[in-house]
Amino acid sequence: MKTQLASLACALLGACAASGPERPDVTLLHNARIYLGAPHWLAVEALAVSEGRVVSAGALAELERGPWNIVARLDLNGGFAAPGLQDAHGHVEGLGEALENVDLRGVTSYEELIARVVARASTLPPGEWVRGRGWDQNLWPSREFPHHAALSAATPDHPVLLERVDGHASLANALAMRAAQVDRAWSSEEEIAGGRVLLDGERRPTGVFVDTACALLERAAPRVDAAVRERRWLAAQEHLLAAGLTCVHDMGVAPATVRLLERLRDEGRLKLRLVEYLSGGGGLSSADLEGFPLAPDAFDRLCVPGVKLYADGALGSRGAALLEPYHDEAHQHGLMVTEPAELQAAIELCVSLGLQPAVHAIGDRANRVVLDCFEGAQRRYGDLRELRPRIEHAQVVAREDWPRFEALGVIASMQPTHATSDMPWAPRRLGEQRIEGAYAWRRLASEPARLAFGSDFPVERANPLEGLYAAITCAGPDGEPREGYRPDQRLSAAEALSAFTIGAARAAHQEQRRGRLLPGYFADLTVLDVDPLECAPAELLKARVLATVINGELVYAGARAH
């Protein structure tokens, strides 16, 4: 019945859309169960697409008789198609770099980390830097931050710099610290505003640098030239298309990156849709934002609607700013990367220029500060709902602040896989009472479709199916705990899909042209070998992407279903 209703409604809409004096040329997308999207998730057999947009949706036989010229057909291999899945928070260049560097995700001990680094160093000439990302000390037996001594002894000829999984801490060996001129005695861990240099008993660096202190190391690392950046961008693009993603909200980029992407678009090499958020911070000026926002181009490949700002650090490195001390480290409250007054000024500058602020806030103190800043901007500039301010992550929110998201029109941009990655250790960080406001998707939006879901890749894998699974189950890949870490926050499959489609589109002011497959919307599809609305959640973790379609064009073709 759902299919029949969709066929009737959309065929009529399509006939109206195509009733002009000329018969448009269309491509028919067929041989799939095609879901049209929220709120009803009706399904059809085929789509008619012209100039990148859906003209009509319905039964294949009806569309073959439509008032248009069929110039091409795209066979979707008997799969199950949804409106193109989107990632509302990722780091594309970071992913491209991670694909080239040592992968430390999932290492279960410091010894394993060192072994992977040594293996890479053995392939490089002496003096060349070894870069890596993904380590998480919470997975190690001690659960403690490492000391560089063992790593330095194993890598005497190569500077080594390894980002923690969340990107908010780095581990350096002795040569890297020497190059950065930080291998000295420090008077205090707190000498760096918005960051920490962890010290040993002799008050010398342990090799672990947190949040803004990481910049001390990065300034010594070799610079990356334009050719390397382009290579990484294109490699990341192919990786994301193969994951079934059609659009990414790319967080924290430089204006030079936008220029690179404009060139790739004009050369026809930009396939993925990109919503770019400029990198902002304390001391942000109007000169930094000159020429922005950048409106979408005709085929909506690239736009720049806003600015990414930072309030605090990350929970795993105890950099998330909390109202009360960490449950497992009583003297630590975390870090405000940007002081509240500076953050207020940066947000108000964005608002004054018509740029959408998207603010990283993980701890409950940081979330409260950002909400206060939005309130302050509202008092000065009026209602911000049209601008749609965003809080990125909104990972731990105090009970009193839950209703403030909807009251202020703030979009909660969240990453479901953070919950399932963090929950084995997050209760130790936060305590059982405070965990109630953590990873609380349902508490921050009365309609889950108003959430914007992503992955924060390369912090997590750039696989939206893992995000769907996490949102539906709140469980680990092994299915445990069976009721979910946060059973009261679990979403239905339709709700989770909505947050990865129309919810993400709404967060970028694009819900009138993206996130559904109705007439007038861009023809973006993610085609799977399982039905994302009907399959058992565990099947999502084994599912294959059969095709990724953008503007009605096949941009990734997976293996055919058997």
Image (cartoon, rainbow, N blue to C red):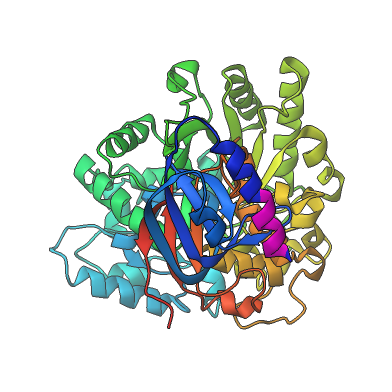
Q: Quadrant of the N terminus?
A: bottom right
Front residue of 315/252: it is: 252
Is residue 205 visible to the viewer in this orientation of the structure? no
Q: Relative to the observer, which residue lies in front, 296 or 195?
A: 296
Residue 194 appears in view: yes
Q: Which residues are magenta?
A: 2-9
Determine the main secondary structure of the stretch shown in magenta: helix
Location of residue 479 (image quadrant): bottom right
Quarter of the image with the C terminus in it? bottom left
Residue 37: image location, x then y, percent: 64, 54
Task: Measuring from the top left, give residue 276's x and y in whole percent.
Answer: 46, 37
| Left or right, 378 with reference to 315 | right
Viewer-proximal residue among 138 and 376: 376
Identify the residue shown where x is 32% and y is 42%.
Answer: 219
- Name the residue: 67% across, 69% down: 423
Task: Please give the name of the residue rendered at 32% of the width and 78% of the height, measured from the top-left corner.
Answer: 115
Q: How many marks?
A: 0
Quadrant of the rendered image containing residue 301: top left
Residue 17 in the magenta stretch? The answer is: no
> Quadrant of residue 338 in the image?
top right
Position of residue 349 measured from the top left corner of the image (x, y, whole percent) = 59, 20
Please tell me which residue lies in front, 343 or 15.
15
Q: Is residue 476 above or below residue 499?
A: below
Q: Is residue 81 left or right of residue 489?
A: left
Instruction: Residue at 42% x, 31% y: name it.
Output: 298
